[in-house]
């Protein structure tokens, strides 16, 4: 247990903003406790050490050039074979992505998946943003981040946790879980992709796009991820002027060896094809695309939605051209509504396309999330460390009703103007 001292209750409240003191105290539990003290003599001097030295140039070296986009190998990849796809045109947000650009993007993602298969990579995270992030050099960038080498079917929770940090709050001054690259390994990765795009790879088989139930989902390194999150929380509180007396030491290193024992969860069916789940979570339907309100509690109500095809397919590269187009249309409208409802936030869209990288429901879906860049590091860390469970039935119905109307109005407002 760590002892954390604040100058006053007001200082405590400021450090945990936007959560109330009551919310914070309710979340704390015996698994990962914090012992809180107050000392009015405490001097709040924020001598902040630099812990995170940045991601570097994400679009550093071009390895492939298409009609509307280029694929790049980052200067400082998060893990081996981390890629960035940048649009050649100045794209002004999620709603500005054009049909032909989106079609080429998904075609390129399938090509990347085919190459990944040749080197034993099963899954990857796809992250795209409504506004350029650190390392994007002002471009519209879609990042493709695979799982750790050697883990295959196993989800390394530490890797997943740090991937969330990179996707959602990469600029936060907390210690990243750095992958131990060998000398020359980044240059070798860059060379590999330049050659791989030229020679190509065998097409994916149907068995690599769909799953047969029941499916075992395997996870490892729960304890290490919990310790890392706890350590990150202490770092953030230190930066807010709290005095932290650390009762234990912890090494922030990425575990890269596959463990002998893993946690296994058997999944018997697709929840997103269940009529009861659809009835409970459905917010909006457009052609062959659905919008769900995420049942998992978010940082604030109405900030986390799921965008998915009505037809069942596990992988993003199993989508049809029509589904890709309709997802593009709905994504842009949903992002616009989220920005109106949460003007202080940015919109992030990410896909976890395999159990090895965090997919829990094997039906491809985008998570469309509004995040406040000023507070997301703290709120996401607390949500991960002290999960609150699911949203209430009252919140589910209220958000569904509110967003359903706004999405319908936004989607069809041009038609309404014609009628008027």
Image: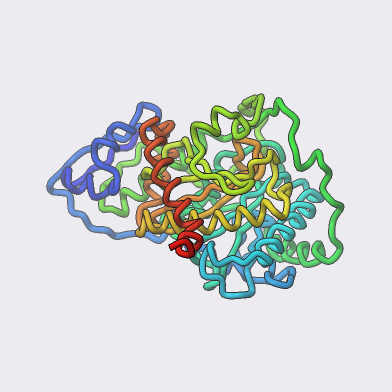
Report the quarter where the C terminus lies.
bottom left
Q: Residue at x 69, y 70 (%)?
A: 70
Number of numbered discs overlaid on the protein picture: 0
Q: Residue 302's image quarter?
A: top left
Residue 73, visible in the rendered structure: no
Locate residue 223, reporting x and y percent. Answer: 51, 33
User: Which of the two residues, 230 or 43, is positioned nearer the viewer here?
Assistant: 230
**Front one among 397 and 388:** 397
Left or right: 5 as drawn, with respect to 392: left
Residue most extreme to the front:
419
Quadrant showing the N terminus: top left
131 versus 155 height, above or below: below
The image shows residue 282 at horizontal and vertical percentages of 51, 38
The color scheme shown is rainbow
Quadrant in the picture for residue 97: bottom right
Q: Residue at x 33, y 59 (%)?
A: 48
Q: Is residue 371 left or right of residue 7?
A: right
Residue 334 visible in the picture: yes
Q: Is 18 left, or right, of 86 in this rendering?
A: left
Residue 252 percent location from the top left of the image: 50, 46
For the point 85% across and 56% down, the residue is 201
The residue at the far bottom in this view is: 89
Query: Image point 66% across, 50% down: which residue?
Result: 146
Is 5 situated left or right of 315 in this image? left
Query: Residue 294, percent across and down?
Result: 48, 39
């Amino acid at each position: 247990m760590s002892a954390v001292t604040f100058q006053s209750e007001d200082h405590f409240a400021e450090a945990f903003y936007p959560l109330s003191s009551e919310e914070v105290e309710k979340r704390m539990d015996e698994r990962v406790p914090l012992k809180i003290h107050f000392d009015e003599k405490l001097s709040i001097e924020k001598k902040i050490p630099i812990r995170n030295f940045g991601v570097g140039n994400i679009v550093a070296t071009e390895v492939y050039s298409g009609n509307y986009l280029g694929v790049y190998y980052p200067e400082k990849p998060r893990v081996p074979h981390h890629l960035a796809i940048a649009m050649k045109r100045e794209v002004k947000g999620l709603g500005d992505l054009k049909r032909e650009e989106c079609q080429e993007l998904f075609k390129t993602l399938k090509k990347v998946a085919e190459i990944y298969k040749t080197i034993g990579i099963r899954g990857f995270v796809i992250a795209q943003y409504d506004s350029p992030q650190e390392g994007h050099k002002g471009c519209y960038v879609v990042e493709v981040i695979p799982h750790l080498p050697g883990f295959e079917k196993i989800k390394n929770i530490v890797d997943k946790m740090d991937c969330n940090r990179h996707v959602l709050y990469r600029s936060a001054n907390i210690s990243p879980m750095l992958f131990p690259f060998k000398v020359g390994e980044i240059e070798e990765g860059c060379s590999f992709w330049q050659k791989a795009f030229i020679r190509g790879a065998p097409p994916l088989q149907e068995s690599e796009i769909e799953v047969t139930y029941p499916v075992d989902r395997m996870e490892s390194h729960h304890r290490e991820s919990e310790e890392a999150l706890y350590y990150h929380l202490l770092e953030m509180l230190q930066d807010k002027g709290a005095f932290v007396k650390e009762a234990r030491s912890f090494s922030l290193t990425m575990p890269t060896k596959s463990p002998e024992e893993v946690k296994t969860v058997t999944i018997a069916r697709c929840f997103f094809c269940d009529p009861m789940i659809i009835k409970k979570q459905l917010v909006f339907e457009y052609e062959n695309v659905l919008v769900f309100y995420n049942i998992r509690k978010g940082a604030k109500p109405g900030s986390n939605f799921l965008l998915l095809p009505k037809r069942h397919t596990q992988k993003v590269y199993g989508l049809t051209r029509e589904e890709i187009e309709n997802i593009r249309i709905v994504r842009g409208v949903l992002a616009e509504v989220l920005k109106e409802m949460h003007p202080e936030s940015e919109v992030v869209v990410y896909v976890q396309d395999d159990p090895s990288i965090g997919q829990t429901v094997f039906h491809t879906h985008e998570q469309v999330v509004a995040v406040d860049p000023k507070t997301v590091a703290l709120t996401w860390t607390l949500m991960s460390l002290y999960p609150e469970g699911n949203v209430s039935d009252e919140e589910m119905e209220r958000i569904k009703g509110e967003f359903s109307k706004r999405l319908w109005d936004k989607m069809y407002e041009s038609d309404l103007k014609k009628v008027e």
